[in-house]
Amino acid sequence: MSEDAPLDTTILCIDDSPDILLLAKTILKRSGYRVLTAKGAQAAIEILAKERPQLILLDVLMPDLDGYTLCRKLQNYPVLAKIPIVFVSGQLNTEADQLKAFQAGGVDFIQKPFDSDELLAKVRHYLSTGQIWENKLTKPVLSSQLKKSAHSLSAFKVWLGERLNFSFESLGQMEFLNLSETFLFLEARGMTQQETLRQLGEYLDWSVLEKINPSHLQLGVFPLNFIRSNGVLPLQPVPGEPLTFALSNPFELALIDLLSRYPGSGRALVSPFVLEQSLLASNESEPVPDAPVLGLVSVPTEVNFQQNLMEPVTRFQDLEQELVSLFADTTEPAAPEEIEEESDKENSPFITRLVNRLIENACQMDASDIHIEPQEYEVLVRYRIDGQLREMHRLTPRKLILPLSSRLKIMSNLDIAERRMPQDGRIAFKHYSSKKLDVDLRLSTIPSQFGESIVMRIIYKQRSQVALTNFGFTSRSLALYREGLRHPYGIVLNVGPTGSGKTTTLYAALNELNTPDRKILTIEDPIEYSIPGIVQVEAHTEIGLSFQRALKAFLRHDPDIILLGEIRDRETAKIAIEASLTGHLVLSTMHTNDAPSTITRFMEMDIPPFMVSASIAMICAQRLIRRLCPDCKEPFEASSLQKQQLKADIKESLILYRSKGCSKCSQSGYRGRIGIHEILLPTEILRESISQGQCTTESVRNLALKHCQMIPLFQDAQAKVISGDTSLEEINSCLLDPERGST
């Protein structure tokens, strides 16, 4: 028995000739290998559903399915794609067959009839290749030298933009594009992929590979899936020289580092190329020497190559039905639609990576919401950043919405079969993210014309510890807000439209109130942030745990402070007010436009006026407006009309700031948001007016301005314009000037 052959080394021989199978089995078993045999593709599939050989010897010509087609189909399954496949053939046209083998995913050829020495030499060599695939491709270590000398995609885009005299707007649009998206962006502006490649080659001082000699291809260096997903082509133009790697993405540092250390390669990319359209296409036509490089990947692709390596698999039974179904009719190759359906499954690696990438990119860009909307021919993905929706992706085909929605429903424990009714759920993303991002997503689906429309609100957990001083309060407003929080009982309300920061502000207030001598209870739908030392309860209306029922139970738990997620109806409002009148401080939110209209909203809910006047401790109306980018905001002298709008002295010089746009703010001129606030602390005069039940929103506003020192939202926003935090255009687009009656 050969010392090179461990007892657990299994080789699968696939051939329709019993004599060839017997010969191969005899030679290999004498050398200590475990040998499995199959007389055709169907028999091989049934074996592969249960066994994982370390090497496959595959006949090129078989009656049920030819070897090239079978090999290509096996590449669709990562667990099988990492097994080296050596083709066995009686007739070899070296150049043409080598190209076919490369396209199919094979590593080498052996010609029939083979002798024992040749067979064993190739078996030993490619068994070691399989070990290299297992070990060398899974633990890359990025060298510090490469980090220092590496080129940057961002720097290339800036270099190209300056060379082509791009506008600031175009540079901003390219800011967050990866390499493939950059190619498409430039192509839409009349620049061909070949022209872009030549510019890239000139920037890097690399050659551009537009044609390839198939004889230079090196089989068996990497698995085909690795080659396809990373856009890397192993070449050896001169026999005996170190390997050269043609790349589709020269900015993938970890990949370049791995290639530089791969066995058989010289120094890091001795003769580097930029690979046009990445890889050779898999087609049935005869290959032509020195043919153009045909695209399996139509444009250079930016990927994380570590995520595309084949994962170790311990069970094969799950593959049996999928694999056999591809060959139900073994007289004909499987239809492309059958293979394409693999990517339509909600748990497929492709869909999993796509969903994770969409969420991770949104978090990286500090988005507050992700919108996934099916259109007639595509799926539109938009992020809400700084309060503005931005189109990020258009995914095709439209049917991607089915596995996308199913995957998100699985992550949020919703019913994947229900597509006709709206559903709401929650995703703890750290359980799914390879980057362990500690964010939650509040998911909502609604049925639409072309499929389910999905919106996810991103909840950044670390923001639960944000202090009140970071919310844009002026010193006067912050003092008033804290004065309202010092009330021993009553209702403290944060009001405003959806997305105005009400809940986040209340959590910051809770952090200030959360001391060991206070018992704090919350009822929320859902719980957005977890705060240590506080008892938090999530509403579940489907089992009867509503806000009203929870509030009644809270009163028996001896609380000092109660947070009610939102006052939505009369019953909830009535119980909250009753709780505040029995010695508890109640914090909550409402959807009203400003502080005065909150008073009349209670009246519309048929809450007795005397209860409203006695319970209101403070009302804080708020909005979030975009903050000018500190790196590019541009000063200018205000005109007389602008001074008049800001209530400034027309005779005095006034310097304001306006948006300009730079790379740090994606050319928008704004980065981040700041709060504006309207704080109402009722005085006895206002309480008396409310208790009489005759007040209107306008009368409450007039009394609040005169007796409660209330600063209206628009006036607070004007102060932030004068201080240079935002622009006059921004507040005019977001707020109503009560004196002008227009925006």
Image (cartoon, rainbow, N blue to C red):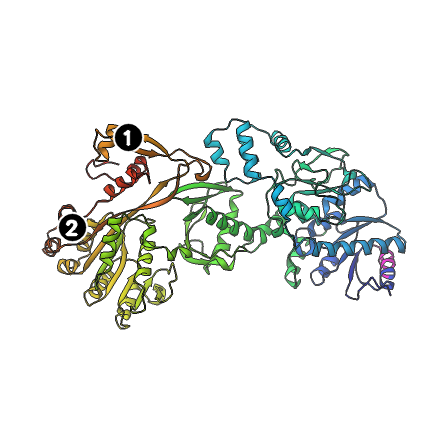
65 is higher (above) or lower (below) than 206: below
Callout 1 amino acid? Ala
Residue 685 within the segment the image draws in magenta: no
Residue 677 vs residue 341, the one in the foreground:
677
- Residue denoted by label 1: 638
- Name the quarter where the C terminus is drawn: top left
- Secondary structure beneath dot 1 equals loop
* Disc on the earlier residue, 1 or 2: 1
Q: Position of residue 58 (x, y in %)?
A: 79, 53
The residue at 24%/28% (across/down) is 640
In the rendered image, residue 697, in percent from the top left (x then y), is placed at 16, 47
Tag in front: 1 or 2: 1
Q: Residues within 10 Å of mark 2 (few under 14, many from 20)?
A: some
Which is the main secondary structure of the residues drawn in magenta?
Answer: helix
Relative to the observer, which residue lies in front, 492 or 220?
492
Q: Which mark is residue 501?
A: none
Q: Tell me if residue 435 comes above or below residue 726 in the rendering.
A: below
Q: Is residue 413 above or below residue 556?
A: above
Provide the residue span drawn in magenta: 15-25
Q: Is residue 240 left or right of residue 456?
A: right
**In what quadrant of the picture does the N terminus appear?**
bottom right
Quadrant housing residue 277: top right
Read off the residue under disc 2: 708
The crowding category of the residue bearing disc 1, from other C-alpha atoms within 10 Å (few below 14, some 14 to 19, many at least 20), is: some
SS under mark 2: loop
Return the x and y of residue 16 as percentages of the image width and height: 81, 54
Q: Is residue 132 visible?
A: yes
Residue 15 visible in the picture: no
